[in-house]
Image (tube, rainbow, N blue to C red):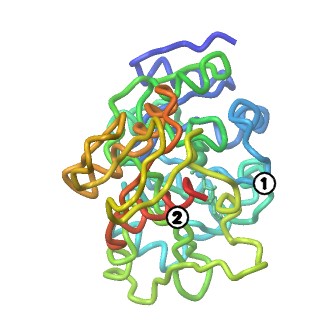
């Protein structure tokens, strides 16, 4: 398959209309989209990414009206979060409508719904005239793509079209919140933090996987975000580095690393980390030392991704 590169959201949407799959930028990471009501197009997403078929996709809408096409009901908790945050890097899990095919949700009776705030994403979604299911536009297991070059590296020749935009603003995947239970549950942390959500609904809790329980968010059990290099989390510089090592963090490390990325804030660290992982792999780095950060605000989401990469 030839992958067409374009900067036109109208041209990209044309591929969706013809049953194709299209990578597009959002404020979190690049997504790989298909029409939510086209089962064979959705099957192509799983194939292109080599995604396990028990890992559900998030449905993206260009306006609030489209949410009604996807869900049985917008629960009262979801209503509050929508009013407070949408469009946002926030996915709400709701009971799915009958007409949404089960391949989109990996056989779950719920569906994750998000309205991105990235301008190009919204133009693309508007031109598609249908909700778009989209997981991150990387090969399964690899770090999520934060620029179009990363999408190209993983998926050139495997997808119909790549809508080229800027590097993504946030760099980590959306916060996922289950709004189908008694109190909202954060299934995956992201730029909208637990503290942000609790300002709207104080009962909101973090979901903790109990040992031996199958996770509520199926994607959480899959290996994620991992570069080829070994990832080690460090909180000081009292360690011996091995050959061809890299460092990313907030403080200046000793000079003996082959690659060093010093970030001025936790936000910048989140923005840079996946691209840095990919750079390290390209440069044949064998070990990446990642400095730990305080686990509040987006620091909680960054810590989650770093821990998964280090597993
Ligand atoms: P990705 O877009 O690649 O980050 O993957 C989407 C992730 O969102 C999945 O791996 C799940 O963890 C989560 N997710 C999507 N839909 C649901 C759902 N219906 N219930 C629970 N979690 C979901
Ligand atoms: Mg993903």
Query: Outermost residue toward the front?
Result: 240
The C terminus lies in which quarter of the figure? bottom right
Q: Secondary structure at mark 2?
A: strand
The residue nearer to you, when weighing 64 against 86, is 86
- In the image: residue 64, left or right of residue 112: left
Q: Position of residue 160 (x, y in %)?
A: 62, 19
The residue nearer to you, when weighing 73 against 39, is 39
The residue nearer to you, when weighing 244 against 76, is 244
Query: Would residue 21 be visible to someone looking at this image?
Result: yes
- In the image: residue 114, left or right of residue 213: left
Note whether 206 is above or below 109 in the view shown.
Answer: below
**Mark 2 within 8 Å of ligand 1, using the beta carbon:** yes
Residue identifier under label 1: 54
- In the image: residue 63, left or right of residue 113: left
Q: Position of residue 302 (x, y in %)?
A: 41, 59
Q: Secondary structure at mark 1?
A: loop
- Mark 2 residue crowding within 10 angstroms, few (<14) / some (14–19) / many (20+): many
Task: Give the mark, 1 or 2, whose residue is nearer the N terminus.
Answer: 1
Q: Position of residue 116 (x, y in %)?
A: 41, 48
**Mark 1 within 8 Å of ligand 1, using the beta carbon:** no
For the residues labelled 1 and 2, the Cα–Cα distance comes to 17 Å
Q: Which mark is residue 147?
A: none
Image-quarter location of ligand 1 = bottom right
Q: Position of residue 275 (x, y in %)?
A: 41, 37
Note whether 52 is above or below 81 in the view shown.
Answer: above
Where is residue 297, by image quadrant? bottom left
Where is residue 139, by image quadrant? top right
Residue identifier under label 2: 176
Task: Please report the residue visible at 48 percent of the width from the left and 17 percent of the height from the top.
Answer: 11
């Amino acid at each position: 398959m030839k992958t067409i590169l374009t900067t036109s959201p109208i041209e990209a949407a044309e591929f969706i209309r013809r049953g194709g799959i299209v990578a597009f930028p959002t404020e979190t990471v690049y997504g790989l989209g298909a029409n939510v009501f086209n089962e064979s197009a959705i099957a192509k997403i799983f194939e292109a990414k080599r995604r396990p078929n028990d890992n559900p996709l998030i449905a993206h809408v260009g306006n609030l009206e489209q949410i009604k096409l996807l869900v049985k009901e917008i629960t009262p908790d979801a209503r509050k979060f929508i009013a407070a945050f949408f469009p946002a890097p926030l996915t709400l899990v709701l009971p799915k409508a009958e007409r949404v095919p089960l391949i989109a949700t990996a056989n779950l009776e719920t569906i994750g719904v998000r309205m991105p705030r990235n301008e190009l994403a919204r133009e693309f979604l508007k031109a598609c005239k249908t909700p778009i299911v989209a997981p991150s536009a990387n090969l399964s297991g690899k770090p999520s793509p934060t620029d179009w070059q990363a999408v190209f590296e993983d998926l050139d020749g495997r997808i119909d079209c790549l809508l080229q935009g800027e590097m993504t603003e946030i760099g980590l995947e959306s916060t996922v919140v289950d709004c189908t239970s008694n109190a909202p549950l954060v299934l995956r942390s992201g730029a909208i933090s637990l503290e942000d959500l609790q300002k709207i609904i104080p009962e909101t809790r973090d979901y903790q996987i109990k040992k031996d329980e199958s996770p509520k968010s199926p994607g959480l059990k899959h290996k994620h975000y991992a570069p080829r290099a070994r990832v080690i989390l460090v909180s000081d510089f009292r360690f011996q580095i091995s050959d061809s090592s890299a460092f990313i963090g907030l403080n200046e490390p000793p000079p003996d690393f082959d690659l060093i990325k010093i970030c001025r804030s936790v936000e910048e660290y989140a923005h840079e980390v996946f691209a840095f992982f990919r750079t390290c792999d390209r440069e044949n780095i064998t070990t990446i030392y990642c400095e730990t950060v305080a686990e509040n605000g987006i620091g909680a989401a960054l810590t989650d991704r770093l821990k998964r990469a280090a597993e």
